[in-house]
Amino acid sequence: MEHENSDILIYTPFNKEKLNEKDIKWINAFQTILEIGLNQITKQKLSITNLISDKPTSDSKEIESYKVMVQLLLDNKYKPDALANENQLLNTKIIQVNCNPEIKGEFSNNILIVNLFDETKNKTIDLSENIGELKNDIWLKILDIAFNIKKELLVIETDNKEFKGKIFVAETSADQNSNRETIIREIEHLGYEILPKENFPKDINSFSELIHNSIKQSFLSIHLIGNHYAPLLNNIDISSIELQNDIFFEVAAELNAENKEIKRLVWIPTDIKPKSEKQRLYIGSFKRNIELLKNTEIIQTPIEVFKSIIRNKADEILETKSQIQTNVEENSSKSVYLISNDLESLTYIKAKEELSKRKVKTLEISQKSNKIDLIQEHYYNLVNCDAVLIDYSIENVQWLNSKLCDILKAPGFGRKKDFLAKSIILNTSNTPVIDFQINDLELIKDDNKDIAKRLNSFIEKIN
């Protein structure tokens, strides 16, 4: 690297006189989490410089010495106008992190925009408190930032790299560029090759040839449909999004004639709001016509769930399940995902022992310090277990409801079958108020202290 002592700049445009203690904690917490993500995916120590200033970034010559600048916009009065002269920073990758839902920004070739706020509630998040309580999607967004930094700073030898397979990721409209970048980094991290490698041309003939060749080499085609009927190709009133879907039809027919097949996943945001009548009509027509195809799935979920669907669909197509999953499938015994909010509770320990006595395989979260690994292992267990057993030993209704919500979302993570049993062992004085309606959810109360008797009905269901 060119700058061994100054790899990354975290820049926060802020008047220091008005910067309060909470803001300082927020900035420091962001840096801590980012360092965790970078250490996880790069396995190298990267230096981060923190700069708080009330001057526009383009006025600082110092910034030009950094390959990556992460600009934190904490307050909506600090607009992206600070980057108005971004042409002066052509050698610096700019990652603009919008921490306030009122901040908006236009995408460009040199800027990646990440919304680091609660998009479901449209409000800012509090990083000044316990970072261990952050939602999964916040951790994953910061991991996406780390992946982008790795891509810029570290030279990865790919010429001799053996990929699992090739996946086509279609060009999308500007409002979905950030999500496309997120998906690309996720797929690359999983060991797949992304096509096309070239930039998308604007000439229709060159564009069509590139898309056709790229899709035909791929086993999976991923398309994102956003709010805009754009970008348009030169001298023609058709968007590249529509044309790419049309070309997919052609390639799928060609492959079918050769007794080959390609699958397509089309993602539409849950909060889709077409910005033009033409886009609204296209989406409606697309949804109606897609029902005739067996090799296409329309997915309308949060982006993090869609990433899980891509991962599982790719594994399903290539039949490249992990060795752990293979072992689970080959094992004739049933498996139970045992979850607890107190891993030292007597009930949890005895439940593990009882399941083992009954020849039931126990899946649980391993003792890992990295939040991202824990999330991925949690999703894996939800997808692959036969039943779920929750040990509720410490009163924490929010924690319990989050786990029950994940059970409901398990099909979105890739689960193909129903749970044989879903039970909660209650070990608290108060019965928790459950926010979700879950069919066949059993509450095992502590009327009987004998764990074997308490688990009888649960084990009968899975056997």
Image (cartoon, rainbow, N blue to C red):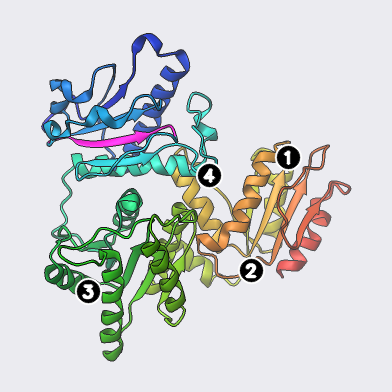
Looking at numbered disc 2 in the image, what kind of residue is underneath it? Asp
Residues packed near mark 2 inside 10 Å, few (<14), some (14 to 19) or many (20 plus): few
Lower position in the chain sequence, tag 3 or tag 2: 3
Badge 2 is on which residue? 418
Which quadrant would the N terminus be assigned to in this image?
Answer: top left
Looking at numbered disc 3 in the image, what kind of residue is underneath it? Gln
Report the span colored magenta. 91-100
Badge 1 is on which residue? 393
User: How many angstroms separate mark 2 from mark 4 (CA)?
Assistant: 28 Å
Q: Which of 283 and 9 is in front in this view?
A: 283
Q: In which quarter of the image is residue 439?
A: bottom right
Mark 4 or 3, which is nearer the eye?
A: 4
Q: Is residue 9 above or below residue 182?
A: above
Badge 3 is on which residue? 217
Residues packed near mark 4 inside 10 Å, few (<14), some (14 to 19) or many (20 plus): few
Q: Which of 208 and 69 is in front in this view?
A: 208
**Secondary structure type for disc 1:** loop
Q: Is residue 216 above or below residue 348?
A: below
